[in-house]
Image (cartoon, coloured by chain):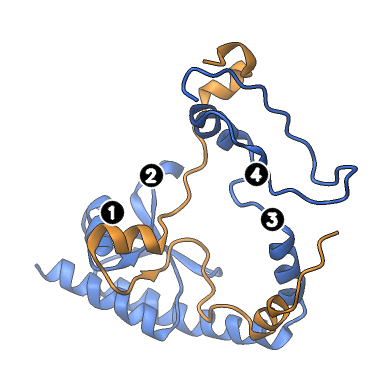
Amino acid sequence: MGRSIIRKRLLDFESYSPGLSIEEIKGRYGLSSVVKLASNENPLGVSPRVLNVLKEPLLVP
Amino acid sequence: MNDATAIVFLTTPDNPSGFAPHVDDLLDFHHRLRDDCLLRIKLPFSVNVIAETAGIAALGDDSFRADTIKTVVQEREILAHTLGDMGFRVYPSQANFVLVRPPIAASQLFEELLRRGVIVRPLSSYGLDDYLRISVGNFEDNETLLTAVHEILAR
């Protein structure tokens, strides 16, 4: 379907394939903990300042 | 939906009604079209309002950034040395990951690590079949990785 509405040059390449997610791997191998060193992780996790800001209600413009 | 023909208009979020619909809300249309085509043209990681808010806050957290850099520099050294000692070719890195060529097939090591709960990045999509890219984790994460690698190579 839709052949006529899709630009031809889009058919020649594949979409970006991101690394696997922690949930996918836990499910696939029945693991309880997973270490992810695949996708530009920060070794310290998330900045506490960011976590605080995200607790505030977000104003959607 | 399988036989339906859909026409999809993708607009910028700043529409006249003054709210910012998430693009996924607009995409209730044929899965094949979405999977095959939309993902080829959109940015792989969406930046939404939450991500923008988090990003602005992160840019202002200088001490967290300094701690992160310190951790990366310190742990990268240990990671590179230990992998080198186990027979990996480790390329010099000034980043928060290392590029390595394992002593066994990269795809095999990748799979074996997955089974042990450690996810690293295979690079075949970059044309580097024999290499892996590993983010520098904290001490515990790196220990988990190095222990798993050691077990796999010892078998």
Q: CA distance from mark 1 to mark 3?
A: 32 Å
Q: Quadrant of residue B133?
A: bottom left
Seen in the picture, residue B49 relative to A58 is either above or below; the reply is above
Residue located farthest toward the left when viewing the structure as drawn: B155
- On the rendered structure, is B92 left or right of B149? right
- On the rendered structure, is A22 left or right of A9? left
User: Residue at horizontal 23%, vertical 65%?
Assistant: A30
Task: Write down the residue under mark 3.
Answer: B47
Residue B106 bears which disc, if any? 1
Of all chains in the rendering, the one displayed in blue is B
Q: Earlier in the sequence, mark 2 or mark 4?
A: 4
Q: Which amino acid type is shown beneath numbered disc 1?
A: Ala
Residue B8: horizontal and vertical position, in percent? 68, 27
Residue B153: horizontal and vertical position, in percent? 16, 67
Seen in the picture, residue B51 relative to B129 is either above or below; the reply is below
CB under 8 Å between callouts 1 and 3?
no
Q: Earlier in the sequence, mark 2 or mark 1?
A: 1
CB under 8 Å between callouts 3 and 4?
no
Residue B124 bears which disc, if any? 2
Residue B112: horizontal and vertical position, in percent? 22, 60
Q: Which amino acid type is shown beneath numbered disc 3?
A: Val
User: Residue at horizontal 60%, vertical 16%?
Assistant: A8
Task: Write down the residue under mark 4.
Answer: B25
Residue located farthest toward the right when viewing the structure as drawn: B16
Q: Nearer the viewer, mark 3 or mark 2?
A: 3
Q: Earlier in the sequence, mark 1 or mark 4?
A: 4
How many neighbours does mark 1 have within 10 angstroms: few (below 14), some (14-19), or many (20 or more)?
A: many
Q: Which chain letter goes with mark 3?
A: B
- Residue B25 is at least partly visible in this image: yes
Q: CA distance from mark 3 to mark 2?
A: 27 Å
Q: Do the residues indicated by labels 2 and 4 lie within the same chain of the protein?
A: yes
Residues A37 and B150: in front is: A37
